[in-house]
Structures are given as structure tokens and as C-alpha cells.
Amino acid sequence: MKSRIEVVQGDITRMTTDVIVNAANSSLMGGGGVDGAIHRAAGPALMEACMQVRQQQGTCPTGHAVITVAGNLPAKAVVHTVGPVWRDGDAHEAQLLSDAYRNSLQLVCDNGYKSVAFPAISTGIYGYPKPAAAEIAVNTVSDYLTRHALPEQVYFVCYDEENTRLYQRLLAQLSPEQ
Ligand code: ADP
């Protein structure tokens, strides 16, 4: 049976999944890293959609997620979630990172989408240690999938080799049906 979770190394903006997830900041107004890459590839329609969300519901708190159109991206929709900035590990970072993954999956599921691609949220500019972040990502997603039919397929899109190796190792430890 095909695994519902896979790791790929590359650029998330090229993913043809129904949804790609953006590691956004609370302002939803774009930024560096994967956020900048997604906005560049999506074009102005994505920023317009983010500005509308801002007007309707204000900023997006850490651990929360919102969904928008995907502009020129191959994906159908973008989920913007805000991961925690790493401080010392005592500022609820693990819970907030898990919330970011779970709330993103909930939006994918609620909107009936079948596939989603995640970047390694918080492991760039936000400084979350990569091994700990990968463990939270894999555990949160696999736990969610045991309890929900959607999404059918989840991809972890790793930009760097360190994350690719970490995710591959963790996924190899999951039971075959996950
Ligand atoms: P954060 O502020 O949440 O740390 P970053 O964008 O700085 O977000 O980094 C999150 C992760 O996304 C990092 O591991 C970084 O290497 C990765 N990344 C950067 N650009 C891309 C891209 N185009 N596709 C996939 N992952 C990317």
C-alpha cells in the first residue's frame, strides 16, 4: 500500500498538489524565505487575497492558519500558517508548531482537498532546531491522518539536505500503512 506521507527535496512553489502551505508571518504581508518564493511565483493575486483576509480578520496568530487562492501557482489553494519563532524551547514552541501543522491540515480537509505539500515550518528565519521540528511535523501529520480521510496525500518538501535526511529517517520509522 502506498504511503500517505512522502518526502521530496525541492522547491515547494513547483508542487502540483491541491494545496501548498506557506510558512507565513502574522502580518500575512509576505516576507523572506519560502514566503517570498511563494509570493513571487504566485503573482499579485496572492497578496490581494492576503490583504482581504487581513481586512476581514486581522493578523494571523502564531499556530493558526488561513486559506487563499493560489494565483499563478500550479496548486489550487495556499494555506498560510504562522509557526513559532524559536526562543529557548520554554515558550510553548512545540505546541505552537504542532498547532500550525494541525490547523493547516484542518483547512485542507474542511475544503475537500486531497493533497497538500508542507515546507519545514519555522526551520529557516524563525530558527527552530531542525531535528525537533521534523519530529513534530511527522508526528502531528501522521496522527492527524490516522483520524481523517482527507488529505489523502501529504508531501514534506525539503529545501536542504539536512531536512531531507531527517524526514526520510523519521518516515522510515512509521508503520507501513501511514
Ligand atoms: P520560517 O520563518 O518559518 O523559519 P523560512 O521561509 O525562513 O520560514 O524557512 C522555512 C523552511 O523553508 C526552511 O527550511 C527553508 O530552507 C525552506 N525553504 C525556503 N525556500 C523554500 C522553497 N522555495 N521551497 C521549499 N522550502 C523552502
Image (tube, helix red, strand yellow):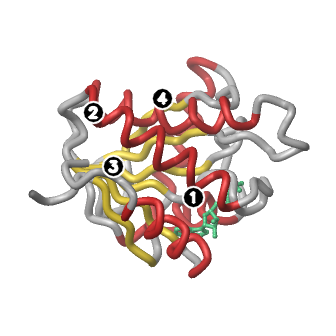
Using the numbered discs, state the Cα–Cα distance from disc 1 to disc 4 in whole angstroms.
15 Å
The mark nearer the N terminus, 1 or 4, is: 4
**Front-lying residue, 97 or 58:** 97
Q: Is residue 65 above or below residue 88?
A: above
Residue at numbered disc 4:
103
Report the front residue among 51 and 148: 148
- Residue at the disc numbered 3: 19
Residue 140's place in the image compared with 59, above or below, is below
Distance from the alpha carbon under mark 2 to that under mark 4? 16 Å
* Residue bearing the label numbered 2: 146
The numbered mark, 2 or 4, whose residue comes first in the sequence reads 4
Instruction: Categorize mark 2 by other alpha carbons within 10 Å: few (<14), some (14-19), many (20+).
Output: few
Category of crowding for the residue at label 1, using alpha-carbon neighbours closer than 10 angstroms: few (below 14), some (14–19), many (at least 20): many
Q: Secondary structure at mark 2?
A: helix
Q: Position of residue 153 (x, y in %)?
A: 24, 51
Sequence-first tag of 1 and 3: 3
On the image, numbered disc 1 is attached to which residue?
120
Marks 1/3 in contact by CB < 8 Å: the verdict is no
Q: Quadrant of ligand 1?
A: bottom right
Q: Does the beta carbon at disc 3 come under 8 Å from ligand 1?
A: no
Q: CA gap, disc 3 to disc 4?
A: 14 Å
In the image, is residue 135 above or below residue 98? below
Q: Label 1 CB, ligand 1: below 8 Å? A: yes
Left or right: 158 in relation to 72 = right
| Mark 4 sits near ligand 1, with its Cβ under 8 Å away | no
Kindly identify the residue that appears in the image at 60 percent across and 63 percent down: 34
Amino acid carrying label 2: it is Thr
Of pointers 3 and 4, the one earlier in the residue sequence: 3
Q: Earlier in the sequence, mark 2 or mark 1?
A: 1
